[in-house]
Amino acid sequence: MTVSTSPTVGAAQGLPAGRYGMSGLIRSEWTKLRTVRSTMWTLGVTVVLGIGLSAIATAETRSHWTPGNRFGFDATRTSLIGVFFGQFTIGILGVLVVSAEYGTGTIRATFSAAPRRPLVLAAKAVVFGMVALVVSEVVAFIAYFLGQALLTAPAIHSTLNSPGALRAVAGSGLYLCVLGLFALGVAVIIRHTAGAISAFIGILLVLPLIVSALPSSIGNEVERFLPAHIGQAIVSLHTGPRSFAPWPGFLLLCGYAALALVLGGFLLVRRDA
Amino acid sequence: MIEAKNLTKHYGDKLAVDQLSFEVRPGLVTGFLGPNGSGKSTTMRMIMGLDTPNAGDVTVNGRHYHDLAWPLHEVGALLEAKAIHPGRSAQAHLWMLAQTNRISRRRVDEVLEIVGLSSVAGRRAGKFSLGMGQRLGIAAALLGDPEVLLFDEPVNGLDPDGIRWVRNLLKGLAREGRTVFVSSHLMSEMALTADEVIIIGKGRLIAQILTAQLIAQSSQRFVRVRSPEVAKLRVALDQEGAATVLEDDGSLTVRGVDEIAIGELAGRLPVVLHELSPQSASLEEAFMELTEDSIEYHGTSTTSTSESKGAGS
C-alpha cells in the first residue's frame, strides 16, 4: 500500500445545479443492493426453493394420483407451494436492506450524503420493491408453468385462462413483494437485524399459533387479518367464508406495509442516527 | 466555517454536551481536544445532522446540515473507522456514496489514489485493517471535494507513516483555504497538527486557543536541584523569593528563579551541587492539568469503567 503525494485534492469546483434527490438515491440503493452477497443468497434461495420445492410437491402429487384426488384439487395452488417459502427469504432481504446499514454504521455515511431521511427510505423501498417484485413474479410464473407441465393426465391441471389462476400466480408474486416491503418497514422501526427478523417471522408464524389458541369466537374474527392468511386467500382458487377476498386482502396487506413504512419514516426523522 | 451556539445534548439523564459554543474557521486546522467521553463525537454528529441537539444550534457555512443542497460537495466527514459493510468493496462503498451527490466514477478512483487504496479497491472491506478502514473513511470525506472537513480521531490505527501522511493531508487541506476540524484525545498529536485547539471536558468548553499560545502558556518551567546541603540552599532560595518543594527523593523543585540564578547563588554561599537541571512540563501534562477536573472515567484498580454509546469519544 503506497501513498501518493499527487494528485492532491482537486480545487473546489462549482456545485451541480439543483439539489440531490430521488434519482441519485435510487441509483445508490441499487449499487448497495447489488454489491453485497446477502442479496444474491436470499434471492438465490428464493428462486431455488420457489421453483424446486413447487416442482417436487407437484411431482409428488402426480405420482400418487388417484381418481378421487380431482375433487377439490387446486392445481394452481399446488404448483405454487414453494413460492411461499420466499416469504422468509424476501422478508430477510427486506430487513437487511435497512438493518445492515445500522449494523455496520454505513447509515451515518448514507445520512451524511442525504440528510433528508424519508427520501432515503423511499429510495430503499422503490429499489427493493422493484427487485423483489421482478424476482417473485419470475419465480411464481416459472413454478406455475413447470407445475402444470408436471401434472400430466390423468391428473388435472390449470391454464392461465382457468378461473382465478392468473390472479393466484401474479398475486403470489405481488404478495411476496409487499410482504418484503412490510419487513423493510419493520426493520426501520427496530433497526437490528436479529430483532427485525424475529419480529417479522413472529408475525408470519407465531401470530397464527397465538390466534388459533384464542377462543374460536375471537380467533375466527382475527385470523383473516393475518398476513399469512391473506396470502393463502390470494393463492387459492376458493377463499374460505371468513377470509378476505383476494384483492381486498391484498389491499389490507399493502396497508400494513404502508403503515410500517410510514411509522418507520416518522421514527427515522425523530431518532438520532 | 462551523458555528456552534450553546449546543446541548443529553442522552437520558446523562449530559453529553453542555452549552458548547465555538467557531471553526477556514484556512486553519482546528483541533478538537478532550478526554474520551468528553462529547467530541457527539458534537461532530450534531454538526452532521445525525444527532439532534436538545438545545442550541450548529451551522455549517451558515446553514443547517439538513438544508445543504449537495451535502458531500459541501462537507466531508470521517466519523468512525470501518463504518463499512464488510462484504462491500472499497470502490463500491465510495461509488454508492458518490451516486447520491452526482459525483463521477473518475473522482472515486481519484480519492482511492489519494489515500493509497487503489490496489485494494476491489477487495471486500471486511478484510481491511483498521488503518485501511481509516484511509477509506478519509477517501469518503474527500469524495465531494468539500470546503468543510471533519475528522474524528483520524490517526487511530495508523502506523507512523500513515500518521505523518494524515498530518500533512490535514495541513494541506487547510492551506487550500478549507475548514478542517479534527478531534483527538492526544494533545501531543494536536500540537503537531493543529493551528488552533478547542478543548472540552465533560461536554463543556474549557478553552479555544491558538496552539502556539497554549504551548507558550503551558510550558511551566522549574529547576531540579540536588545538593548534600539542601536545607541551607533552600533557606537561601526562599529568601530570594523562589518557591521550593522538597521532593520525596531528596531533590528540590524550584520555581520562580532560573538555573543561572540558582547556580550563582550556590557559588556565593557556597554550597555543593550534585544536580542543577531545568525541566519543563510537557504539553501533555498541561492538557491533563486543564482537563483534570472534567475527566469522566478515572481508571481505578478495582472498578472497570464503561462508556455509553452517546458519550463515546
Image: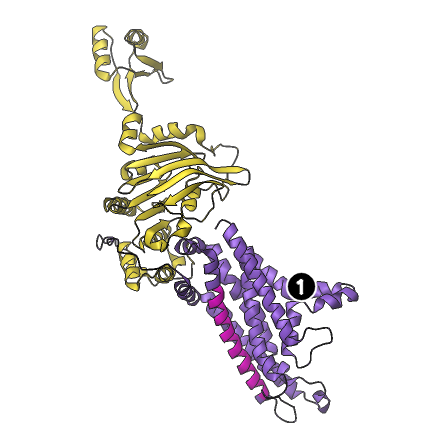
Residue at 55% x, 86% y: name it.
A145
Span colored in magenta: A124-148
Q: Is residue B241 above or below residue B151?
A: above
Q: How many marks?
A: 1
Relative side of B285 to B276, left or right: right
Q: Nearer the viewer, residue B265 or A9?
A: A9
Residue at 48% x, 63% y: name it.
A122
Q: Quadrant of residue A10?
A: bottom left
Q: Quadrant of residue A64?
A: bottom right
Relative side of A66 to B143, left or right: right
Residue B223: % across, % down: 28, 19
Residue B173: % across, % down: 26, 47
Does any portion of residue A194 appear in the rendered image?
Answer: no
Q: Quadrant of residue B109?
A: bottom left
- Image quarter where the N terminus of chain B lies is top left
**Residue annotated with mark 1:** A206
Q: Nearer the viewer, residue B43 or B263?
A: B43
Estimate how packed mark 1 is, as few (under 14), some (14 to 19) or many (20 or more) residues with alpha carbons within 10 Å: some
Relative side of B113 to B125, left or right: left
Relative side of B121 to A32, left or right: left
Say if the magenta span includes residue A135. yes
- Image quarter where the C terminus of chain B lies is top left
Q: Of helix, strand and loop, which one carries label 1?
A: helix
User: What is the letter of the purple chain?
Assistant: A
Q: Nearer the viewer, residue B72 or A83?
A: B72
Q: What type is the residue that disc 1 sits on?
A: Val
- For chain B, give the colour: yellow
